[in-house]
Image: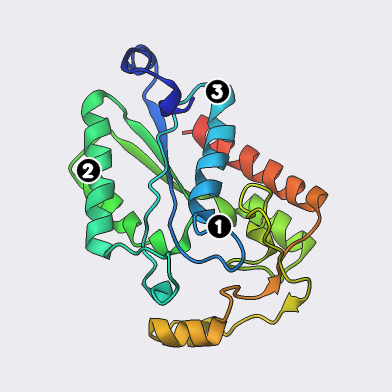
Amino acid sequence: MKIDACHWRRIEEFLASDDRCVIPLGCTEQHAFLSLATDSILAERVAVEAADPIGVPVFPVLAYGITPSFAAYPGTVSLRVETYGRILQDLLSTLHRQGFRRLMFVNGHGGNTPGRASVMEWMLDHAGAQIKWHDWWNAPQTMQAVTSIDPVASHASWMENFPWTRLEGVESPREQKPMTDLSLLRTLEPVKVREVLGDGNFGGYYQRSEPEMRQIWQVAVMETRFHIENW
């Protein structure tokens, strides 16, 4: 149940019998030949498809995250770690005051991980609240589905290339890009990161077949739904 399809009375009615909600977390950053909003698109879509059949509210995706390494790519927007943590805590506090007690973040961007510490700090002062942090793309079943198809997959590669993250008129390369040394990448400032990465794909093919992508997506939706249903 998407919040943008509800008025406030619908949420008040929901809270009379349930206290769950889902907050997708994304990012605006380079994704090679895919949309700059790839992480946000995927996080919100998997959350909505997982939650819709069980009627749990899904709030609009937080479309900005922590991504300083990609600052040399135009269109990338990065929040400071402190800023991001404060935003998450403000979201939790607002929803908690309204009666939500079981809140689940569906995260689509690995760089947002420092936000988990801010969530844990918030929980210290809010006994009775339960918070889940679900990294949908590398959750066990979803990652198993990815590696069973092709173990060479990472940021901006085929594993993020779905019909809803592609751009009209933009063709992806057909070759397999060698994996980047990620340990080296973490030591570089943004301009050097761009020099090493080039188009932005960390490594792997840029696109795979539609049946393979549907298989991964179905697993991701079902795995996310399991966590929304089971507390």
Residue assigned mark 3 = 54
- Asked whether residue 230 appears in the rendered view, the answer is no
In what element is the residue under mark 2? helix
SS for dot 3? helix
Q: Vertical placement of 74 versus 198: above or below? A: above
| Camera-side mark, 1 or 2 | 1
For label 3, the crowd category at 10 Å Cα-Cα, with few meaning under 14, some 14 to 19 and many 20 or more, is few
Residue drawn where x is 70% and y is 41% of the image: 218
Q: Amino acid at mark 1?
A: Ser
* Quadrant housing residue 186: bottom left
Q: Earlier in the sequence, mark 3 or mark 1?
A: 1
Q: Amino acid at mark 3?
A: Ile
Q: Is residue 93 something that shows in the picture?
A: yes
Residue 40 percent location from the top left of the image: 48, 50
What element does badge 1 sit on?
loop
Q: Residue furthest left?
A: 125
